Amino acid sequence: MSPAPPPGSPPPREGTPAELLARVPKLLDAMRSVGSGLGLHATLNRICETAADLAHARYAAIGVVDEDGEGLADFVHFGVDEATVHRIGHLPDGHTGLLGALVRDPEPVRLTDLTEDPRSCGVPEHHPPMSSFLGVPIRVQGEIFGNLYLTDKHAGEPFNDYDLAMVRVLATEAGIAIGNARLYEAAQQRERWIDGSVAVTTALLAGGDTDDALQIVAERARRLSGAAAGVVLLPADGGGLEIVAVDAPRPTNALGAVIPPENGIVAELLAGRPVFVDAATDPRLDDGPVRSYGPVMLLPLCGDGKVLGCLVMPRARGDRPFTRTERALGDRFASQAALALTMAEAQRDRERLAVYEDRDRIARDLHDLVIQRLFATGMMLESAQRRSAVPEVRDGVGGAVDELDVTIQEIRSAIFALQQPAEAPTGLRTRVLREITMAAVPLGFTPSHRFVGPVDTAVGDLTGKNLIAALRETLSNAFRHAHAGHIEVVVDATATLPDGRPGVRLSVADDGVGVPEGGRRSGLHNLERRAESVGGASRLGPGIGADGGGTTVLWEAPY
């Protein structure tokens, strides 16, 4: 016998079941609840809870179908406590069993006992027992979004026709609410990626350190994509791709590592094609730390018709794959970053050209003016020496002439160094001297230098490359912040590291203002990161000014 309609309800229309009419107000409340709010995941949770209440079900869930339509990309549930979820261990993937059947054939399903259905299989251990079942597809703008599942109606009753009718109406309203939530989240997501692109462009064009700017690219990429890490790779000198910036929760020694050109993924990226893989299973990836990740998005950084590098965003193992929207937004972000890199490189080329022109001018001035005047002064002294009758005067003048000859030779060496091309392949000692000579132009003076031990033969290529980058960073910081009048550079290839290993130690000491409290320390972080990438360390000490004024930067690493 059907229950009577509640007091105050209109009389039932002829042919309309009283039970259905009695549940219409609750259905309207449920539809209003589902339509409130714009967050997608919150909307899915609200749909589950509302559907369970409407159909008097103990459990409810929504399986979100993946973009390929072959499984579930997400699974939102209601009624199962967190402790039970933890014991179950993993959520359904929609490839097998009854849920898999509904993914492949999205039509309403109503079962009195799901355990008796031949499609029901693979129930994991610790899963709560369930009997009655009701499944209804959810469509968003005519396309399947997922399925709404209800199990275990209260009092042990099976789901009836009224339950199915109500839930189908609710699923229709849920599709509208989900569509609105998806549009809202897509708009917010696009806004975040656009803001990230603006921040990267600003950082790259600000004229700061290149490594600092690339680190910002890695940080933004990781944050925007929801990845476990953000990695920037640039073409290596000997081919392949070198890791030049890493943003991850924990310190890593990946900085400076080179992925060889024969790797299949590297070939794809250098050809300008994006790659989407699962690091846990893809055979093109080497065994090692990379296997601890899951879905990975690798995007080439293309500009001016060539590949400038690569942006890598790996997610945690078992995490959801990147959606088409995320891939498209990531690709646009990579294109914007590549454009900013191209513009920043052009800006640095102009700055380098200005430095080279300044060096040429200095070399000409030294040759045409300073050396000529020194020659004239030397000739005048030699003439005075010949005319002097006092032996002590002749000896003193002769010593002065000898000193002038030495000075002329040193100036000629400086002219030669200024005229050398920066791209010439050289040893570590010469590269250190080149950095010191380059720094002399903005500093207004040449830092003193000293080498200890077999610098060129003992220090390996990777450590030497990072040492040069650390020296460049330190001299740049001294010019921009220290206001120093004197700088001493020491490269010691006979150093012993704190753990007893032999290594090389770079010391750059100045008499400037020191490191201010609370100041920006991105350059110092870069030094630490580079040292850690080759198993070393970096630290600060007192400078060479009065009473220890200024700063000494110590950077050390094993050979």
Image (spheres, rainbow, N blue to C red):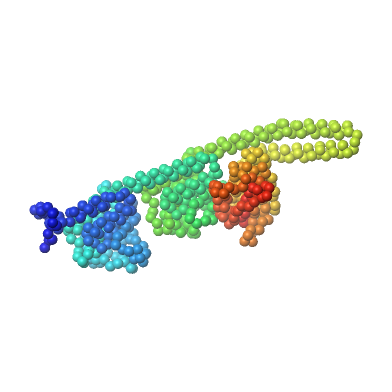
Q: Position of residue 82 (x, y in %)?
A: 35, 63
| Residue 510 image point, x, y percent | 65, 46
Tally the marks.
Answer: 0
Seen at 51% across and 48% down, the residue is 215
Q: Quick check: 342 above or below 531?
A: above
Camera-side residue: 35 or 128? 35
Q: Which one is nearer the viewer's eye here, 295 or 169? A: 169
Q: Quadrant of the C terminus?
A: bottom right
> On the rendered structure, is 394 left or right of 349?
right
Q: Position of residue 65 (x, y in %)?
A: 31, 54
Question: Left or right: 382 with respect to 555?
Answer: right
Q: Residue at x 46, y 59 (%)?
A: 292
Q: Position of residue 519 (x, y in %)?
A: 55, 47
| Residue 373 in sight here | yes
234 vs 122, left or right, is right
Q: Is residue 34 left or right of residue 190?
A: left
Q: Tell me what residue is drawn at x 72 percent, y 31 percent.
A: 369
Q: Which quarter of the image is occupied by the N terminus?
A: bottom left
Instruction: Decide: is 403 above or below 522.
Output: above
313 over 340 or under it: above or below: below
Residue occupying the point 17% across, 58% down:
162
